[in-house]
Structure formats: C-alpha cells, structure tokens
Image: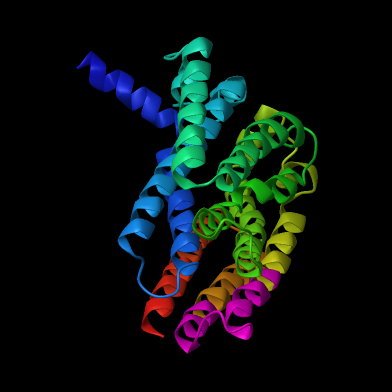
Amino acid sequence: MMTTSVFRQYNALTKPRVIQLIVFCALIGMVLAIPGWPSLDAWIRIVWACLGIWLVAGAAAAFNCLVEKTLDAKMRRTAWRPTARGELSDAQALGFSLVLCALGSFILYVCVNPLTMWLTFATFIGYAVVYTLVLKPMTPQNIVIGGASGAMPPLLGWAAITGEVGPQALLLFLIIFLWTPPHFWALALYRVEDYRKSGLPMLPVTHGNRFTRLQILLYTVLLMAACLMPFAIGMSSWLYLSVAMVLSVGFIAYAVALMREYSDELARKTFRFSLIHLSALFAALLLDHYLF
C-alpha cells in the first residue's frame, strides 16, 4: 500500500495528462516523417524515441513542480501536487527529475540519434529553467515566449526519424506555438484569482479580462491560418482540410462567444475544446497520411 502511494506521488510529478499529449504530438511527427507504413526498424526507433521523450518531459514537469511548490500551494488547481503538500522532499523531487532526464537523454542519444537528444534536452532547459524560473514570474507574455518549448514535440519526432529538422516539422511546431496562448489563457481566465493570489503576472491579472479575451480571439484567427497550411503546401489532402476547417471555426466561435459575454463556464468550455482541437487536428493529419 505504501509502495503504491509513493508511486502515485512520483507519477503525479510528471503531469501524466500533459505528457500523454506531448508524446502523442511527437509520435505524429515521427509517423508523418515516414512515407508509407513504418518498417520494423522504424517502429523500434519510434518506441525508443517515445520512451526517451516521455522521460525527459516527465523530468521537466517534476522540476517545475519542485521550483513552483510554494506557488502551487497557493492555487486550488495545483495545491494537491506532492511537492506542494510536502509529501515529497526537495531532494526526492530533484533526484527523480535528474534520473528521468539522464535516462531519457541516454536512450535518445544511443537508440535514436544525437540531434533528437540535444533538441529534447534544450526543450527541458527551455521549459524547466527559461520558462519556469525566468519568464513566468517576469512577464505576462510568458506563455507566448515559453510556448516554444511546448511546441517542440512534433519537431522532436521528425528529427528522431529523419535526423534533421525539415520545413514540415517547423509547420507543426508553428501550429502548436499559436495554439498554446488561447489554450492557456482560457484556463487563466477562470483561474484568475488563483494567479492573483500567487503573484504571477498572468495576462488576465495584468491586463484584465477583456484584453485577454481579445488576445484569445486574435490568436485563434492566426491559428486557423496556420492549420490550413499543411493542405496549402501539399502535406495533406481534403480530409485533413475538412477537419481543420471545422475545428478552427469551432475554436474561433468559442473565442467570439467569450468576447460577447464572459462567464467562467464558457472559459472552461473553451479550454476543454482547445484540447479536443489539437488532439483531433493531429489525429486527422495521421489519418490523412495513410488514406491519401
């Protein structure tokens, strides 16, 4: 029973739901980089790459929990985390993060390729250090600048298969980069009191509710343009285009509704739809890749 409880505490540090989306997007990048169905050797590399990326991403999440334990304890959304509750010590959290990072980096370097290892490690530094320690407490544009780290998974996946960073991978990076601000700011709108108590300069705290809603709307429009580009450059066919159009119009519709009349419930629905948007968009890319 004690062992199960400890496992759950360490597992919680890795932010499993976030990691699942990260690995999924990385997997899409890997598969799209392969013309046709992957060979056995390619599948082996894909498995190793997913494992390595999962470990390093988990390490970054654990380090984030350690650094922000005081802030997490002030916010209802994060007060349950083991570091915030004091269930795991600083040494335990730091040691866990370092072990995951070292093991994941080793796997990527030996079983995938050095480029993927270095890009993944750079993502770790970008999120755990640059975003968490520098940008997040400094500027309300933290999520925009720091979003570059969160947009890396498909690029990592592409590099794992091809050994290089191609223009198609950069386009996938751009889509997630533009998706991140409206996704996160929708959450920040209905969690604004948490952020105000924490002292973090999140956009709804520093610039107000209406300005944040305007930014969400503008970013969803930019995101729609980026989502149509895979079809425009011949990376996908009409199947993907149809799904991308429906999802993009849906996201914009939520943003317009937020601008017209705000409610916490609508902001919560917008946040949830943003998760569906990204998952379904990348799933459509995958399906399109094999059917056409």
As drawn, is 27 to the left or to the right of 153? left
Most frequent secondary structure within the magenta stretch? helix
Rendered view: 79 above or below 268: above
Rendered view: 44 above or below 100: below
Image quadrant assignment for residue 12: top left
The span picked out in magenta is 222-245
Image quadrant assignment for residue 41: bottom left
- Name which residue lies at 51% across and 35% down: 105
- Name which residue lies at 60% across and 47% down: 115
Rendered view: 54 above or below 227: above
**What is the x, y in percent for residue 4?**
24, 22
Q: Nearer the viewer, residue 216 or 174?
A: 174
- Name which residue lies at 46% across and 21% down: 96
**Residue 78 in sight:** no
**Residue 67 in sight:** yes
Q: Nearer the viewer, residue 42 or 138?
A: 42
Residue 225 lies in the magenta-colored region: yes
Q: Which of 50 and 67 is in front in this view?
A: 50
**What is the x, y in percent for residue 125?**
66, 34
Residue 189 lies in the magenta-colored region: no
Q: Nearer the viewer, residue 175 or 274?
A: 175
**What is the x, y in percent for residue 110?**
47, 39
